Image: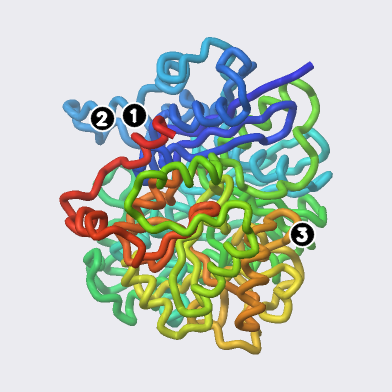
Amino acid sequence: MSLTVAGISAHFHDAACGLLRDGRLVAAAQEERFTRIKHDPSIPRAAFRYCLEEAGITIADVDAIAYYEDPVKKLDRQLWMALPHVPPATPPSLFRLDPGRPQREIREVLGFDGPVDIFDHHLSHAASSYYFSGFDEAAVMTVDAVGEWATTSYGRAEGAHLELFEEVRFPDSLGLLYSAVTAYLGFDVNDAEYKVMGLAPYGQPRYIDEVRSLIAVEEGGRFRLDLRYFDFLGGARMFSEELCRLFGAPPREAESELTPWAHDVARSLQAVLEEVLLAKVRYLHRRVPSGNLCLAGGVALNCVAVERIVREGPFRRVFVQPAASDAGAALGAAALSHVRRTGERPDARPLPHVFLGPSFGADEIAGLFRSSPARIVDLRGREDDLLGATADRLAAGKVVGWFQGRMEFGPRALGNRSILADPRDPGMRERINALVKKREAFRPFAPAVLADRASDHFELDHPAPFMVETCRVRSPLDLPAVTHVDGSARVQTVEAASHPRFARLLEAFAARTGCPILLNTSFNLRGEPIVCTPVDALACFLRSGLDCLVLEDVLLDRDGLPESWTRAFAAPEARPARVSDRVYTLL
Ligand SMILES: [Fe+2]
């Protein structure tokens, strides 16, 4: 019997939809990519519609929708936490407290009349990792800010069976600890935690005792925050005045200069996070002495902590759900629904890739330019020429927008919606920042490397296709654009079998330069979601200073752009908002 289940996450952060057909993950996407609203939390109408189109089905073919958290349990916590502090005349806050909203919007916005399965948030996270890990059995750990009540959970899984046997409950939360200090350091909560991680290697752990005083690590899986330092229980901000006194300074102003003090606080926070995670992973191994560990939850996106768990932890193999935050929990909910309905686990093979989003044909893309005044190079049916021309430009120091195949699911661009450049160029980090990223100069870019050459350049003894962990750089080449100040890099290994065109591009670049590595960063402007459609990519190209755009088989150099286009897009007021929203329906 055939079974089709859609998993949904929404109403907090990074809404997403994923579709399982007979246990096989056929499509998944985050809503932000379609609406062009970063971290869009809305019920994922466009992502759901896309998943149906990709599978070639209608809503009548969907047997169940699985939702990634229990809104009634969540309300219980929200009432405990916030209601006394919500002023009576703040409808948005009260709206968020409506436990009927997910079901209602699944009916009214998505138009689905069938069964809705509700799963606990951390169980959805756990399932998003275990059921896609390829392991027959594993220990499972999830860590985020908060779900309903749980903030950390510990579990075991074997075959189709997955159970969580212990949890740490709100307000004791590693995610909230990290977010509170992120806010104190002047960065956006739920968005910029990775910047604090990137800042950490510049500092010294001078404040490690102060950070340790924020969290008491207890027996078993437990830990406890000292709530004197935090104000997220209904307060207007994440941290209290007491925290400012502890670190001896007022909160850093957003966008102000980053001082050694901020570096040291970031380093100390990161060190304590790693310390606590390692202790709890060791505890989990004592309870579940498996060789395999599955990780998920937003804190599992901390790739530096993951590296330490891989290197120093007791588990031989570690699988991190690539979309470890709430977007990925949609996949977990779908998997749980599949298990509930069949008694069997979904597809037991390891997740082969995350190219689960929309693709656009080469003919369709070439057709966009049929009447345009842009001078495109149409290389349809001539892949060697396309790769050669792209590699020539990269070797000449050009920055290339590279758009191929199906869009990635999760936060990382992995060679289908990527900006690529020569990692050996010492000026490249600044150049890309100036052209497109406009981001903090302290953050390094990531390298993509041919899998069979990876160990020549990086201390890595296993495939790393998803950029979920860092490792040491040991390359005979100088790779300043992708090496962090502490000598680490967040590497993506590229296999020809699962990612043939990107692998061949790396080979073409290596043939010209001797370097089988490219700088790979996500294809988007600062503050915007990664591009989804060819027109998103074209708009990003026009609004940035990228040198070259490759859309499937069509190559477009900056000097091939008509002046009227560059003039129109240079004026900030002419920048189109929500480009993708319009174009997705047109294409
Ligand atoms: Fe979560």
Whole-angstrom CA distance, mark 2 to mark 1, is: 6 Å
Q: Residues within 10 Å of mark 2 (few under 14, many from 20)?
A: few
Q: Is residue 19 above or below residue 555?
A: above
* Numbered circle sitting on residue 96: 1
* Numbered circle sitting on residue 317: 3
Q: Is mark 2 in CB contact (under 8 Å) with mark 1?
A: yes
Residue at x-position 26% and y-position 54%:
565
Q: Is residue 513 above or below residue 272?
A: below
Q: Of the residues shown, which amino acid type is indicated by label 2?
A: Pro
Using the rendered view, name the quadrant where residue 264 is placed.
Answer: bottom left
Residue at x-position 65% and y-position 53%:
320
Residue at x-position 47% and y-position 23%:
72
Q: Position of residue 184 (x, y in %)?
A: 31, 62
Q: Which one is nearer the viewer's eye here, 7 or 225? A: 7
User: Secondary structure under badge 1?
Assistant: helix
Q: Which one is nearer the viewer's eye here, 233 or 473? A: 473
